[in-house]
Image: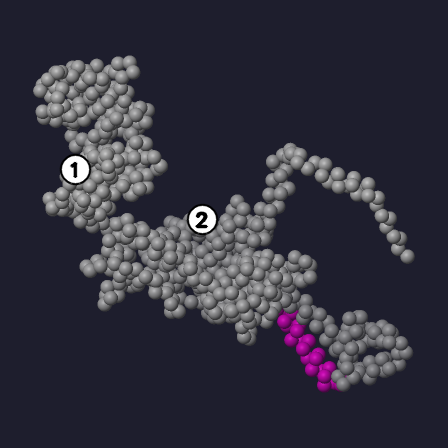
Amino acid sequence: MPQKRKKEPASAKRTQQEALFENAGVVVEQPIIDTLEKNFMPYAMSIILSRAIPEIDGFKPSHRKLLYTMYKMGLLNGGRTKSANVVGQTMKLNPHGDIPIYETMVRLSRGYEVLLHPYVDSKGNFGKAYSRDMAYAASRYTEVKLDAISAELFRDIDKDTVDFVDNYDNTMKEPSLLPVTFPSVLTNSNVGIAVGMASSICSFNLAELCEAAIALMKNPQTPIEDILKAPDFSGGGYLIYNRSEIDKVYQTGRGSFRIRSRYQFDKSNNCIEITEIPPTTTVEAIMDKVVDLVKSGKIREISDMRDETDLSGLKLTIDLKRGVDPDKLMQKLCRLTPLEDAFSCNFNVLINGTPRVMGVYGLLEEWISFRQNAVHRRVSFDLKKMSEKLHLLKGLEKILLDIDKAVRIVRETEQESDVVPNLMIGFGIDQIQAEYVAEIRLRHLNREYILKRTAEISELEEQIAELQGILEDPKKIRNIIAKELRDVAKKFGKPRRTLILYADQQQEEEPLEEIPDYAVRLFFTREGYFKKITPLSLRLSGEHKLKEGDIIVQDVESSNAAELLFFTNMGQVYKCRACEFDDTKASVMGDYLPARLSMDEGELPVYMAVTKEYNGYMLFAFENGKAAKIEMSAYMTKTRRKKLTGAYSDKSPLIASVYLDEDQDMVFLSAGRVIVAHSSLITVKTTRESQGLQVMQLKKNAKLEKMLPLKDGMFENPQKYRPKNIPSMGSLLKQEDIGEQMTL
């Protein structure tokens, strides 16, 4: 009888509870290194090894568990089954929940259209890889089975070609790798993000890939770039061929290449139909970007755009305005939108449990080595089975010599346990052969049956000799792999979907943007409002509408193609073009620049410079009496940058700025003193943040108040205020110059 456990006294229970909460709320110091080693590192390794990084067979664990479950369910042949059934069965191997399993199935399906060679034959709505908004249906509505190419994933899996491991609860076995007969790691694209590392593998054409693998087995020094020309994607498009970048990806596994959308021009409807886009974007992302460009005025050639995707496939239609060149517009759109995008490669693959970044050469060599091992194990398995069968048949052959003797031995043996030993003694055979003979049915103890079975001996001996020859000669194993690769290429190979666009097939120079050029008047107010008005509209307009208390501080005659630079109170300059603003009227308030140019909080424009060729200078005056003359070319950029920081020095507050086409007389004022100095006396600086040259010597607590160009009638005798040298204290303002004409 088992002894009953004694009840612990209540005092003992209280003592245990007190011990549990003894250190509650107490901060215990723990070295960060120990925390990383005990908590973070095991988690990171689990993500790297068990989730995000594919292995040499081209699959992550979630992919492998799903496909193997479908294989064991008999979905390689026959009809489809509900996706929910597959998801439920897969949970025996994958404990992460039904939603992640179904999402994995969606990506592997034919309906999703992300893989060049889908592994799951699907029926129903599985969404689309090229659409952000087209969601897949629930698993209870869709049906799946394994696609025909999946047979190549499991060929000879029951012949000890790969290792099997326990599942998460040790109730089933699952393969650690799949014995794929083709380089699936490069056949379909694969992207994953782990902890501290990521993987991004592009897809290649299956026929080209098999041919490249065969060429490498024959000669490891073969330049496969001539065979495997470039990546190939399920979405098609054009790949902008760059040999140096392709070589970099093939050698190192890192690099990028650009994919351009494919389109056709419908002349009858005057519209562009886009049917293939890069794999890194979606239809919605393209449409959002085009809408932004149209709203900002950068694209004016489009009248309408709509998504006409249907069951026949992707179709994005762009209606053009009359007289627009579709090819020039598409070049512009490819430059400004994701219609042309880059695919970044990072061929990070787990090799024997270690993540390694390898190029196409390295991955193909590793796959060939993996496949050689799988074929070697398969041949060894077949050899073992044939040897065992041959051994049994040779024992049966000895029985042929005297069947009556065998029957007599069995009949005269008193105990069943002695039958096998007596047969071993009577015919000189071992225990395994004797067990086999003893299990023969009575109806088979005839000469015809035994002769038929023993006739296989010579055939088995030939096959065994052939298998032994294969195991001893690696070249024969490579020939087997090559034959299987040719069969796969012949059966499942397809023409390239992504066409290659070489350098000589595209325009090297970007087309110049056509900007309508006509005369305009530009108005800039103290509160930061801007107006662009044509001369005709200005003549027909009345007074300017301004915000209460606001005034116009700049009125410039220019053209619609002019460049505008708005300098702000925070030492920054915002660049744009006059054509980016709509023509308006004097009766409207105009564009509020801080909002239109997305300026920082509290930032206001203080000066507008209008230029075309970036000739001349910007002259800045500061409260400390210094003036800086910066070449206008310092604000020119090769790219169309909208914002430049460090437009001028922030060592002293800015009091005035002027754009000068050429040097001229300038007036400086401080505490009733005036200097008239020619701007050529101020040396030009190459750096925008230069503090400049001291122009006016200031009294204690005084500051430079104003700077502006000298105009006729401003002074009766400007020479009285012109010093011999600068810096200078300046001259007191004369009585005759104080009056209405004094606009300082």
Please give the name of the residue rendered at 60% of the width and 65% of the height, measured from the top-left corner. 88
| Residue 587: image location, x then y, percent | 18, 44
Q: Which residue is mark 1?
A: 556
| Residue 488: image location, x then y, percent | 49, 67
53 in relation to 146, above or below? above
Q: What residue span does the magenta drawing correspond to?
A: 445-467
Determine the main secondary structure of the stretch shown in magenta.
helix
Picture mark count: 2
Task: Give me the C-alpha separation between circle 1 and circle 2.
Answer: 52 Å
161 in relation to 195, above or below? below
- Which comes sooner in the sequence, label 1 or label 2? 2
- In the picture provided, is 278 more to the left or to the right than 741? right
Q: From the viewer's side, name the closer residue of 197 and 664.
A: 664
Q: Secondary structure at mark 1?
A: strand
- In the picture provided, is 545 more to the left or to the right than 382? left
Please give the name of the residue rendered at 37% of the width and 65% of the height, measured from the top-left corner. 309
